[in-house]
DNA sequence: TAATGGTGAGAACTTACATCA
DNA sequence: TATGATGTAAGTTCTCACCAT
């Protein structure tokens, strides 16, 4: 079931299930424009409310999908390190990054060599793709840095790499993966949130369907007593049943068409959605 | 207790795309 | 407008640690 399902009844009423977003959070994008600005929904931070509506067909429904700019760091040039591996050799040459490697200054290359020794010295061979396990201290410092900014500019990357005794490329990769994990986690949270919303709305939808059914039944029954003069219709204040005001023998006949007990109509104004 | 297979986490890599000069 | 450089997201591959058997 989607979040934009509508049930059109032959009564001219529409039961709609939708999502509305009163406001949405927009992550401020840094001074310079950067990576692809893809829509990024964060349902748990958005002022977001599922909605069920019961109305006339022909009404417009729909939900606005906010477009949120992803966070973006400084895009100063030059990626200082390009690690190659037996698995990446072919595509590395076809990649645009190859050129970057070529453009490294001799100083930068020297920095790379120095920092590379740290973790490369125990490699089996030139083609080994050794998996480095970051120490607790390294991870902690990276985490701390990530809290401050989820993206790094080249200077920050260099400094952090020096501090951690890692290659700048490793720091860069760590930040990429960290951002990915953060997003994945957020997606999972959003997913759970939407599941709950869906359940709530499904229940509400079911209840409204039931009420709609009752209304339709009522509409069919209506003509039978609507023929009577309005003055003859009275409502019992205690049980809220409609009576005819006729006493005696006729009263018992007419009371057969009494209204059902007070219906539990859903009122969106006095009974706001309990969803989420 | 050592060997083995399954599995999850995460480091490293590739590709596609947006942006800017 | 076309092009190359660059950074990032998304997806994939691969390694390693851990656990059950």
Image (cartoon, coloured by chain):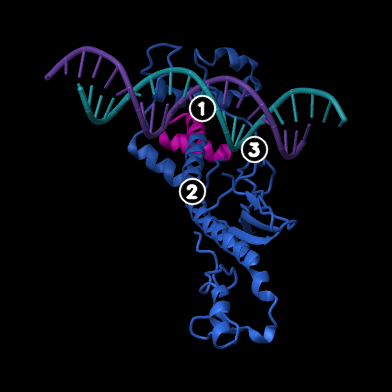
Chain colours: A blue, B purple, C cyan
- Say which element carries label 1: helix
> Label 2 marks which chain's residue?
A
Spatial distance from mark 2 to mark 3, Cα to Cα?
41 Å
In which quadrant of the rendered view does residue A51 lie?
bottom right
Q: Chain of mark 1?
A: A
Measured as percent of width and height from the top left, residue A76 is found at 64, 37
- Residue found 62% across the figure and 67% down from its top: A221
**Rendering quarter of residue A140:** top left
SS category of the residue bearing label 2: helix
Q: Is residue A87 above or below residue A5?
A: above
- What's drawn in magenta, residue-wise? A153-174
Q: Give the residue at mark 3.
A: A76
Q: Nearer the viewer, mark 2 or mark 3?
A: 2
Front one among A246 and A170: A246
Q: Is residue A200 left or right of residue A132?
A: right
Residue A132 makes an appearance in the image: yes
Residue A39, given in percent of the width and then of the height, sits at 64, 44
**From where the camera sits, is residue A48 visible?**
no
Q: Is residue A116 above or below residue A32?
A: above
Discs 2 and 3 carry the same chain letter? yes
Question: Which quadrant, please, contains the N terminus of chain A?
Answer: top right
Could you say which is closer to the camera, residue A7 or residue A145? Answer: A7
Compare marks 2 and 1 and give the one earlier in the sequence.
Answer: 1
Q: Which residue is mark 2?
A: A195
Mark whose residue sits in front, 2 or 1: 2
| Residue A141: x %, y % from top left | 41, 42
């Amino acid at each position: 079931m989607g979040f934009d399902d509508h049930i059109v009844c032959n009564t001219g009423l529409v039961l709609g299930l939708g999502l509305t977003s009163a406001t949405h959070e927009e992550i401020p994008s840094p001074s310079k424009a950067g990576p692809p600005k893809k829509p990024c929904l964060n349902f748990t931070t958005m002022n977001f409310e599922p909605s069920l509506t019961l109305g006339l067909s022909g009404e417009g429904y729909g939900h606005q999908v906010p477009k949120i700019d992803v966070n973006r760091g400084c895009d100063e040039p030059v990626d200082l390190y390009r690690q190659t591996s037996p698995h990446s050799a072919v595509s590395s040459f076809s990649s645009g990054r190859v050129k970057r490697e070529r453009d490294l200054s001799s100083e930068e290359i020297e920095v790379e060599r120095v920092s590379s020794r740290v973790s490369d010295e125990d490699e089996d061979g030139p083609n080994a793709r050794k998996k480095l396990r970051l120490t607790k201290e390294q991870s902690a410092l990276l985490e701390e840095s990530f809290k401050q900014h989820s993206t790094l500019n080249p200077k920050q990357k260099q400094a952090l790499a020096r501090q951690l005794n890692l290659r700048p490329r490793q720091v860069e990769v760590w930040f990429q993966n960290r951002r990915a994990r953060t997003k994945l986690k957020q997606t999972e949270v959003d997913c759970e949130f939407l599941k709950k919303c869906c359940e709530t709305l499904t229940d509400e939808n079911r209840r409204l369907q039931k009420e709609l059914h009752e209304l339709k039944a009522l509409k069919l029954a209506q003509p039978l007593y609507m023929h009577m003069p309005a003055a003859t219709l009275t409502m019992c204040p205690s049980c809220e049943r409609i009576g005819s005001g006729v006493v005696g023998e006729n009263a018992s006949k007419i009371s057969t068409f009494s209204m059902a007990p007070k219906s539990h109509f859903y009122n969106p104004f006095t009974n706001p959605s309990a969803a989420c």
